[in-house]
Image (cartoon, rainbow, N blue to C red):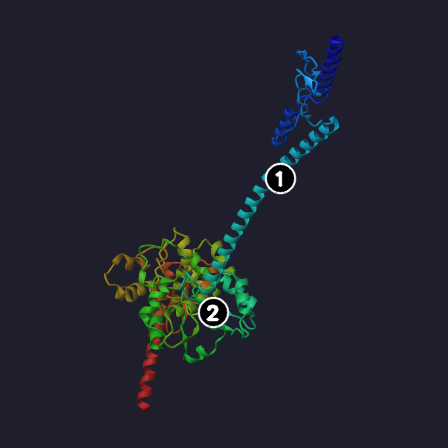
Amino acid sequence: MADNNNDVINDILNQLDNAKKQEAEINPIPEKTEEKAEAVGSSEEPVREEAPAPAPVPRPVHRQLERRPRPSAEGGHEGAAAPPPARAQRPRINESEHVRNSAAVKRNAAHHKKKKKKRRSRLPGVLILTVFIFAVSICLSLVIIAFGKDMFGIGKDDTTKMIIVPENTNTEQISQQLYDEGIINSPKCFQLFSKFRKTPDVYLPGEHFVSPNMAYETIIDTLTNEAEEEKKESVNVTFREGITLYEAADLLEQQGVCKASDFMFYFNAGGYGNRFEDKLNKNTSTLRFADTRMEGYLFPDTYTFTKEMDPEQVCQKIYYNFDKKLTDERIKKMENLHLSLDQLITFASIVQAEAPNREDMNHVASVFWNRLEHEDAETVGMLQSDPTKNYANYTIKPHMTVLNNDIVKAYDTYQSKGLPPGAICNPGIDAIDAVLQKMQSDDYYFIANIYTQKTYFSKTNDEHEQNKAIVKADEAQYEAEQAQREAEAAANE
């Protein structure tokens, strides 16, 4: 009986061991697998699928055989130990479900990685856009500031400039003209400003004086307002050919246009932006008389001024007229003759003072050309012009604060060779063209009869002396006839 009980107990124990072996083979260490899955889910690296761990080798179970308790009289089992409590069964994980979980973990990790990559790629674009917007804002601010300064004339030159407005000029044309003259910096901005004005802009033709530091509103008012011009009294002043700067200044003061001293200062200062000013010799001779530095550039003509006019405006009108007379054709001829502008005007001033008409001017100019270019002649480069001697002694000397004989001598062509350091008067267009024509002749001398306005030319000094005698006789005869006419007029009274 005892042997049968032992056999039953051993069968039960063997079944339990077999059940444990099967459970271990199906679900080996489920806790570690879950921990590993969690670790893979939290990592950014791609999940590697590992091979399943080998099933643990079952250890021999040595259990102490217990005797099955005998039933007692009360119905229990006497002396038998209580059976061990049943172990809690862990949930069994299906192999296909495990594979699906691993794939889900991989997709989740890849999704997180892709999302992070996208976030990192947006940052440079945002920075570039921010810098671009910032740069555009700065550029727009600078443009607005520049247009504002131009519109209100802030920080610009205050030099007054004369512009000539043609007939039927519109806003687009006047804005371009103002831009070309350096008055405004943006024609488009001026046009836009004019467009938003309530009143139409009708520009008055003629001369107007504006400056870069004027606001757009002031410029438009100046170009369209006729009332201001009507308030000023107009004065017509005629400068004859051969007039000197001192004579012109005195004439302006006599007509009530401006003071003579103010005119002399501003006229010699120049710098009004005319084209011919760029062709002036910047390094003038130290022997040039400073008080008449711009002698020769007052073009003889009739000008319309106003009473008590700004002397700068007076000078600009004269400068403008001279600039228009100095055409491209004349400049080209001047350059072909290898003359500077100062030399041309100085040369022409002597011709103007020596000859009474255009025909004689051409011949007189040829004599001076021969004397300047043919040094082997008797004159040896000496012009020997009486007007130069008179200018040195009767114009320069009286206006010198401290006498400088070197300057006086330099202007006197009887004492100095070649052209004087500056002009001796303001020549007209005929004298300038006579020099540029460079008439060909063999003459080196001439003498003019101041009474008859006749000029005698000669090749040699002997011929010249004979002509001088003729002129003196003609002058004596003219003076005698004049005295007789005066006596007869007195007797008739």
Disc ID at residue 219 = 2
Q: Position of residue 408 (x, y in %)?
A: 28, 60
Report the residue at 47% width, 54% height from top.
337
Q: Return the residue at label 1.
A: 118
Nearest to the observer: residue 457 or residue 363: 363
Q: Secondary structure at mark 1?
A: helix
Q: Residues within 10 Å of mark 1 (few under 14, many from 20)?
A: few
Nearest to the observer: residue 427 or residue 453: 427
Report the residue at 32% width, 81% height from top.
483
Nearest to the observer: residue 68 or residue 351: 68
Location of the C terminus by quadrant is: bottom left
Question: For residue 170, which quarter of the picture?
Answer: bottom right
Q: Amino acid at mark 1?
A: Lys
Q: Is residue 117 above or below residue 383?
A: above
Q: Amino acid at mark 2?
A: Ile
Q: Position of residue 288 (x, y in %)?
A: 32, 58
Q: Is residue 223 above or below residue 274?
A: below
Q: Position of residue 74 (x, y in %)?
A: 70, 21
In the picture provided, is 129 more to the left or to the right than 69?
left
